Amino acid sequence: MIQSFLVLRYFMLLASFGATAGAVLMFWQGGADLFDAARSIADPQNSKGVAANVMSATDSILFGIVLLVFAYAIAFGLVIDLSPETRERLPAWMRVESVSHLKLSLIEVILVYMIVDVATDWAQIAGSLEWSSLIKPFSIVLIAAAARLLRHATG
C-alpha cells in the first residue's frame, strides 16, 4: 500500500519538466532581448534602448535560472532518491534536506529576481518616478525580513 503511494511522487517530475521547459523559453526570450539590444545600437530610433534591452534580457535569463533551480530541487530533493555518495557530489544548491529548506532557497532566489526586475522596470521608465514605484522595493524588503526570520526559526 505504501509503495503505491510512493509511486505518486513521480508525478512531481511533471512539475520539474514544466519548470525546465519554462526555463528554456526564458533563456530564449533573454537571447532575443540581447539580440534586440545589439540591433538597437545600429538603429537607435526603433528600439527602447540598449540598457533597457540588456536589463530585460537579464531579467528573463535570471527568471530562467530561478525555474531551473526549482526544477532541480524538485527532481533531486523530492523525487529521485540518490545514494549518499551521489548526493555529496551535487552542488550545495541542489541538495535539499527538507521542504522548508527548499522553501527558503526559492525565496532567496526569487528575491534576487525581484531586485533585478525592479531595476529593469526603473531602467525602462522614461522621466521621473512616481511614489507607487516604491511598492515593489518595499515588498522586497518585507519578504527579505520574513525570510530572515524563517531562517532563524528553522536554523
Image (cartoon, grey):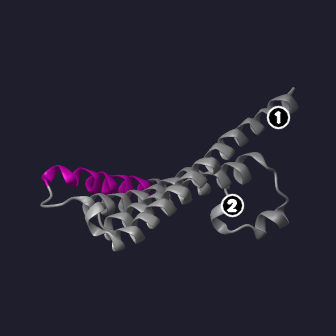
- The residue labelled by disc 1 is 7
Corner quadrant of residue 116: bottom left
- Using the rendered view, name the quadrant where residue 10 is placed: top right
Mark with earlier residue (1, 2): 1
Could you tell whether 42 is left or right of 20 in the image? left
Sort mark 2 into few (<14), some (14-19) or many (20+) by Cα contacts within 10 Å. some
Nearer the observer, 79 or 151: 79
Q: Which image quadrant: the C terminus?
A: bottom right
Magenta residue span? 130-149
Name the residue furthest top. Answer: 1
25 versus 126 height, above or below: above
Q: Position of residue 153 (x, y in %)?
A: 48, 54
Marks 1 and 2, how far apart in space? 21 Å
Left or right position of 28 against 41: right
Q: Residues within 10 Å of mark 1 (few under 14, many from 20)?
A: few
Q: Main secondary structure of the magenta part?
A: helix
For this rendering, which residue is in front, 14 or 95?
14
Q: Say which element carries label 2.
A: loop
Residue 63: x %, y % from top left: 49, 56
Tell me the amino acid under the disc marked 2.
Answer: Arg
Q: Looking at the picture, tell me which residue is in the foreground, 51 or 61.
A: 51
Residue bearing the label numbered 2: 95
Residue 77 visible in this rendered orientation of the protein: yes
* Dot label at residue 98: none
Q: Which residue sits at x=81%, y=35%? A: 6
Q: Position of residue 29 (x, y in %)?
A: 50, 56
